[in-house]
Image: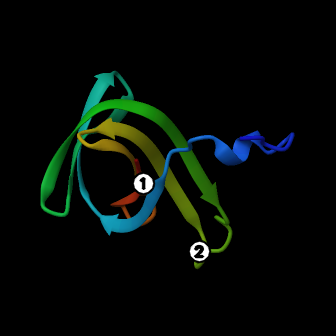
């Protein structure tokens, strides 16, 4: 099959994701002093043990407007069945599962 120049990216395999906004319960571990991270989480009645932390980042903004302020810590983890993005809302002190990578 001939692929027009510059269109190669259209035919590459890319990971698929599913977005959620489900509340979850999270267990913590501290592999190094001062660096806490999820060790397991419960989602839809099932417990997932975290095999590893793949990425961590924090998003915060609009702190000057309490109605729109946000402050989230994100953890991309590998666990049974795939890769998951877990978000901790620092203002509400609540966890949610945001995304599942296939």
Element under label 1? strand
Q: On the picture, is 61 further left or further right than 89? A: right
Residue 90 seen in this snapshot:
no
Q: Nearer the viewer, mark 2 or mark 1?
A: 1
As drawn, the residue found furthest toward the front would be: 1
x%, y% of residue 5? 87, 40
* Other residues around mark 1 within 10 Å, as few (<14) / some (14–19) / many (≥20): many
Which residue: 33% across, 42% down? Answer: 82
x%, y% of residue 49? 20, 38
Q: CA distance from mark 2 to mark 1?
A: 20 Å
Residue 88 vertical placement versus 82 (above, below):
below
The residue that mark 1 highlights is 87
Residue 29 vertical placement versus 83 (above, below):
above
Near-viewer residue (12 or 62): 12
Residue 4 vertical placement versus 94 (above, below):
above
Instruction: Determine the image quadrant of residue 70.
Output: bottom right
Which residue: 59% across, 74% down? Answer: 66
The residue that mark 2 highlights is 66
* Other residues around mark 2 within 10 Å, as few (<14) / some (14–19) / many (≥20): few
Q: On the picture, is 76 further left or further right than 63? A: left
Instruction: Determine the image quadrant of residue 19.
Output: bottom left
Near-viewer residue (1 or 8): 1
Q: Count every numbered label the image shows and give the total.
A: 2
x%, y% of residue 8? 75, 40
As drawn, the residue found furthest toward the bottom would be: 67
């Amino acid at each position: 099959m001939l692929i027009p120049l510059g269109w190669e990216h259209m035919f590459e395999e890319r990971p698929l994701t599913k977005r959620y906004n489900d509340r979850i319960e999270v267990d913590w571990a501290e592999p190094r002093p001062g660096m806490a991270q999820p060790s397991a989480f419960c989602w839809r009645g099932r417990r997932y043990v975290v095999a590893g932390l793949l990425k961590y980042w924090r998003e915060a903004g609009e702190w000057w407007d309490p109605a729109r302020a946000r402050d989230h810590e994100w953890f991309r983890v590998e666990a049974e069945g795939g890769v998951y993005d877990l978000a901790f809302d620092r203002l509400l002190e609540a966890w949610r599962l945001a995304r599942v990578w296939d």
